[in-house]
Image (cartoon, rainbow, N blue to C red):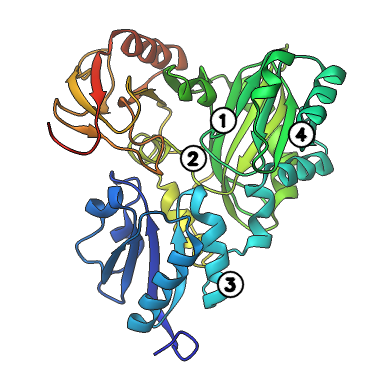
């Protein structure tokens, strides 16, 4: 039976899943016994699907629209047209929004998420709302790039208009760097902002704040791609959080009139009262260890809220912006020494007094794979909690300095 003849099954949910670890607790979000929940997974994610899944289909790339369309059609033939197609990673949302429209599934469409997914439109929206933004321009060639830098100064940041995890982002220091830029996709350039990058993860309820937490990076995501450890720690300074609350009050209502989960990045400009410059925002749960920290430290599951919203269900009984614990949370990602995939030769556990409360470090012989889940498969993942920002930051810094990992390139075969 073709999809044109298939009927909706109000129980059938399709989940697009790319993680090896349990970033999302799907069995608590969907009653797998009440109706079919089918999964489309990448090879790396195939081992972490609930055993109660109605069907699991593995594809090489969830970003391949043609393959995904055929896979969803096959699942719809078997279980009925899905009431929802759920995807919790940003990189697959352009494909999933197209499939929702094509198969009549619940959830936001491409036009709803365009200004959250495409950085040129995102910056234009922030400018329209009236929050501070870096000087920004679309660039199509080396001449455009050189002219922008001549006007606004070096260094500049060039990035694809679409992408996540800092893929394709470069910091250009001088005219000598320009010729190495390849314009193989839509690009934009921004003036460099020499201030710390902060992060806010939370829920906006359409007319008021749900829970949110403000953090700052120790280093940054771009540096991590070039081999620098990436730390992240929540901010316990009441004045800084109050200033961010005012920034959010202006920004969030202008981006979407409906409830949404968000991951905001901004520059924090120091001052007696800090101010903020918009960098980017996603309508999704923050990446890396964020879902774990919210569940384990704050007792709140952001992924559960995002799943409800993707099924067209407005979340109920959410806590106020103050979460259930005053503990400060943080994480550390250590890069892999070799290009992925690589095999671990030696690794050091960092659990113990003064260290993380949880870690993911492969034992010797384990393989760090190449994966669409970029921040999952790294040299080491560590989660921290403590009474103060300063205390958690000190623990992160200590682990980053003392962690030991040795890897060798791996071609997929055993010698």
Name the residue carrying label 2: 286
- Please identify the quarter of the rendering in which residue 200 is found: top right
Cβ–Cβ below 8 Å for labels 3 and 1? no
Pick the quarter of the image with the C terminus. top left
Cβ–Cβ below 8 Å for labels 2 and 1? yes
C-alpha gap between disc 3 and disc 1: 31 Å
| Viewer-side label of 3, 1 | 3
Q: Earlier in the sequence, mark 3 or mark 4?
A: 3
C-alpha gap between disc 2 and disc 3: 25 Å
* Residue 318 seen in render: no
Q: Position of residue 52 (x, y in %)?
A: 21, 66
The circle drawn on residue 199 is 1
C-alpha gap between disc 2 and disc 1: 9 Å
Pick the quarter of the image with the N terminus. bottom left
Along the line of sight, the residue nearer the viewer: 250 or 165: 165
Along the line of sight, the residue nearer the viewer: 144 or 192: 144
C-alpha gap between disc 4 and disc 2: 32 Å
Cβ–Cβ below 8 Å for labels 4 and 2? no
Q: Earlier in the sequence, mark 3 or mark 1?
A: 3
């Amino acid at each position: 039976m073709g999809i044109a003849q298939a009927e909706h099954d109000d129980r059938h949910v399709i989940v697009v899943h790319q993680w090896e670890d349990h970033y999302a607790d799907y069995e608590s979000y969907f009653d797998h016994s009440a109706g079919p929940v089918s999964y489309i997974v990448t090879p790396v994610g195939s081992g972490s699907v609930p055993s109660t899944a109605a069907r699991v289909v593995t594809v090489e790339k969830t970003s391949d629209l043609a393959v995904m369309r055929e896979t969803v059609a096959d699942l719809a033939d078997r279980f009925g047209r899905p009431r929802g197609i759920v995807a919790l990673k940003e990189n697959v949302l352009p494909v999933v929004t197209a499939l929702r429209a094509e198969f009549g599934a619940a959830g936001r469409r491409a036009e709803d998420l365009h200004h959250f997914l495409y950085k040129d439109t995102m910056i234009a929206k922030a400018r329209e709302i009236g929050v501070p933004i870096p000087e920004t321009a679309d660039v199509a060639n080396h001449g455009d790039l050189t002219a922008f830098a001549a006007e606004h100064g070096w260094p500049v940041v060039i990035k694809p208009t679409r992408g996540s995890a800092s893929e394709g982002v470069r910091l250009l220091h001088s005219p000598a760097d320009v010729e190495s830029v390849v314009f193989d996709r839509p690009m934009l350039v921004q003036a460099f902002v020499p201030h710390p990058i902060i992060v806010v993860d939370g829920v906006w309820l359409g007319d008021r704040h749900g829970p949110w937490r403000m953090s700052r990076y120790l280093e940054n995501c771009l540096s991590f791609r070039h081999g620098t450890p990436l730390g992240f720690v929540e901010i316990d300074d009441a004045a800084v959080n109050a200033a961010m609350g005012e920034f959010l009050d202006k920004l969030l209502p202008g981006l979407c009139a409906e409830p949404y989960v968000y991951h905001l990045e901004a520059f924090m400009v120091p001052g007696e009262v800090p101010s903020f410059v918009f960098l980017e925002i996603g309508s999704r749960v923050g990446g890396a260890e964020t879902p774990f920290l919210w569940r384990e430290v704050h007792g709140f599951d952001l992924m559960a809220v995002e799943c409800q919203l993707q099924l067209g269900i407005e979340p109920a009984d959410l806590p106020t912006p103050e979460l259930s614990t005053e503990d400060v949370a943080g994480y550390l990602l250590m890069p892999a020494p070799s290009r992925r995939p690589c095999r671990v030769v030696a690794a050091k556990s960092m659990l113990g007094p003064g260290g993380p409360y949880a870690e993911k470090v492969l034992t010797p012989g384990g393989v760090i794979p190449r994966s669409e889940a970029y921040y999952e498969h790294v040299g080491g993942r560590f989660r921290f909690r403590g009474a103060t920002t300063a205390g958690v930051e000190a623990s992160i810094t200590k682990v980053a300095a003392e962690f030991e990992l040795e890897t060798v390139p791996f071609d997929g075969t055993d010698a």
